[in-house]
Amino acid sequence: MNHSETFNLESWQHSHDFSHNNLKGEKRIRYVLTLTTATILVQILAGVLVMLTGSAIPDLVIGLVIVAFI
């Protein structure tokens, strides 16, 4: 390398600003988190009903409802 030449770093540099907004992605994440939370709460309810009644019917019904949505 000739001492009079300079090495240009601009082609190797990029922005380090990782705070860009992705509203569509954020909306999808909220949807997934809400759906997951609702599913977990319904499964807990089914488990409590199974425990209280001694029957697997509540668990089966709620499981079929969840499968229907998927």
Image: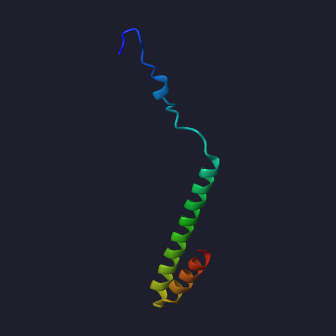
| Quadrant of the image occupied by residue 64 | bottom right
Q: Quadrant of the C terminus?
A: bottom right
Number of marks in picture? 0
- Residue 33 higher or lower than 67, as above or below: above
Q: Residue at x 46, y 28 (%)?
A: 12
x and y percentages locating residue 14 in the rendered image = 50, 30
Is 54 in front, or is 21? 21
Kindly indicate the quadrant of the structure image that contains residue 7: top left
Q: Residue furthest top?
A: 4
Image location (x, y in percent) of residue 22: 61, 45
Colour setting: rainbow
When the figure is inspected, residue 38 is found, relative to residue 53, above or below; the finding is above
Residue under the point 60% across and 51% down: 25
Judge by depth and name the residue closer to the eye, 69 or 35: 69
Q: Work out whether 10 lies above or below 62.
A: above
Q: Nearer the viewer, residue 58 or 31?
A: 31
Residue 43 left/right relative to 5: right
Q: Nearer the viewer, residue 41 or 34?
A: 34
User: Which quadrant is home to the N terminus?
Assistant: top left
Residue at x 61% of width, y 75% of height: 69
Name, please, the residue furthest toward the front.
2
> Could you tell me residue 2's position as x and y percent?
36, 12
Q: Position of residue 44 (x, y in %)?
A: 49, 74
